[in-house]
Image (tube, rainbow, N blue to C red):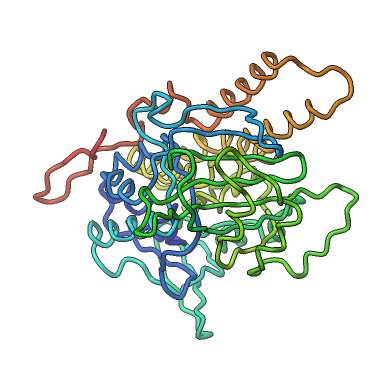
Amino acid sequence: MRILIAGAGIAGLTAALSLHAAGLDDIRLVDAAPEIRPLGAGINLLPNAVRELAALGLDEAVGASAVSTTELVYFSRHGEVIWREPRGRAAGHRWPQLSVHRGKLQMVLLAAVEERLGGQRVRADARVTDFRLLPTGRVQVNLAHRTGGTTTTEADALIGADGIRSGVRRVLYPGEGPPVWQRQVVWRGIAKIPPFADNRSMFIGGDRTWKVVAYPIAPRPDAAGLVDTNWAVARTFGPDEVVDRAEWDRVVDPAKLLAALDGWVFGPLDVASLVTAAKAPFEQAMVDRDPLPRWTFGPVTLIGDAAHAMCPMGSNGTTQAIVDARALAAAVAGHPEVDTAFTAYERERLDRMTLLQNCNRALGPEVVVAMADRASSVTRPGPSASALDRELAEVSRRYAELGGFDVAMANTDSSYSVRRRPGPGRPTPQETGS
């Protein structure tokens, strides 16, 4: 059975490795980028995602260039600590929470695909523009190239892992339109600064309008004593504000943010110094996708952002893409027909991801910043500190359960590990970590 994966990002590469671990060898990936390069900024992998990478034998390779995050701290815009909680192994998890550059994770996955599946499995400069089901039950896929040419290919199954602007999704839902703006703009960058806290902390702070996120993505300082630190600043616009979006999606001068953030200090972290240390920060609209009623149409299905692109709250986008890929491969291994396998995968994942998408639109766990800001600004007596702490703890607990990374759920062995189906003269080794 030939499986074609649209997209050679985190979701697509993890799917290829997981399907190969389940015994499928005829796997091809296509990607719209002219070449696969380590682009992007910092991302977080929650323990349930690291568990799945461990089952593929890749946790050490990823962890070598990542930070094992031990604490998450929320601040008010005035620098007061709102809430703090241990993360990863410091919270009792078997697997760590990792902060890493997206490109480095992608290159680890790509190298594993090339090693395990063999070369020439990933074709760059090939964007899915259309597909149709053939009378034979196979899928004919149209690909566009930057040279202006087009080609076609066939497969027994098509997996859309091609991101928030997925070509596969566009064919399935032709009237959907562009991603949905959530009335926020975000600026992102990577700054080289001296380590803050213990170089294993994530800081989030702000109020109901502005939010700052910062965390290191290099495990050790460089020769100059500086650490690559990922940061993002988001501004929320009110429903009555008129916003000109014409100049977004571009590199901007970080000085544009300083008027709003001047004087913001989160413990040892000076926000203005963080922002000014960045090279070429990028400004863009914060967008997501509306939840879908279904992802699977016969031998075609969606995973990752193509299925459920969500606002970047709670570090769940990349995590859930990895879990999707693993769940899909386990379903394929457990069902003789690809249609029923894809339907089983959707049945397991869709409802939870819909809840998570809607939760992230309501700020996810980062709503605690707005809650604390609101509580401190009311004129009437607000909740006591202990009552607010209990409320914030409950928000964190519910979100962890929804995302599947609470200690009880994430500490179990992967339920997606499968025995590799034997081929002629081939043994049946079980996946690492299962």
Residue 340 visible in the displayed image? no
Q: Residue at x 46, y 44 (%)?
A: 342
* Percent x, y of residue 230: 52, 52
Which residue is at a point 44% across and 45% down the rendered structure image? Answer: 99
Q: Nearer the viewer, residue 24 or 70?
A: 70
| Residue 361, picture quadrant | top right
What residue appears at the point 45 percent right and 67 percent down from the top-left corner? 31
The residue located at (59%, 24%) in the rendering is: 398
Q: Residue 279 at x, y = what percent? A: 55, 66
Residue 422 drawn at (x, y percent): 17, 45
Which of the two residues, 349 or 367, is positioned nearer the viewer here? 367
The quarter of the rendered structure image containing the N terminus is bottom left
Residue 282 in the image: x percent, y percent? 62, 64
**Residue 194 shown left or right of residue 175 in the figure:** left
159 in relation to 207, above or below: below
Indicate the quadrant containing the C terminus: top left, top right, bottom left or bottom right.
Answer: top left
In the image, farthest residue toward the left: 425
Q: Is residue 369 left or right of residue 23?
A: right
Residue 268 placement, left or right of 63: right
| Vertical comparison of 53 with 147: above or below | above
In the figure, residue 381 lies in which quadrant? top right
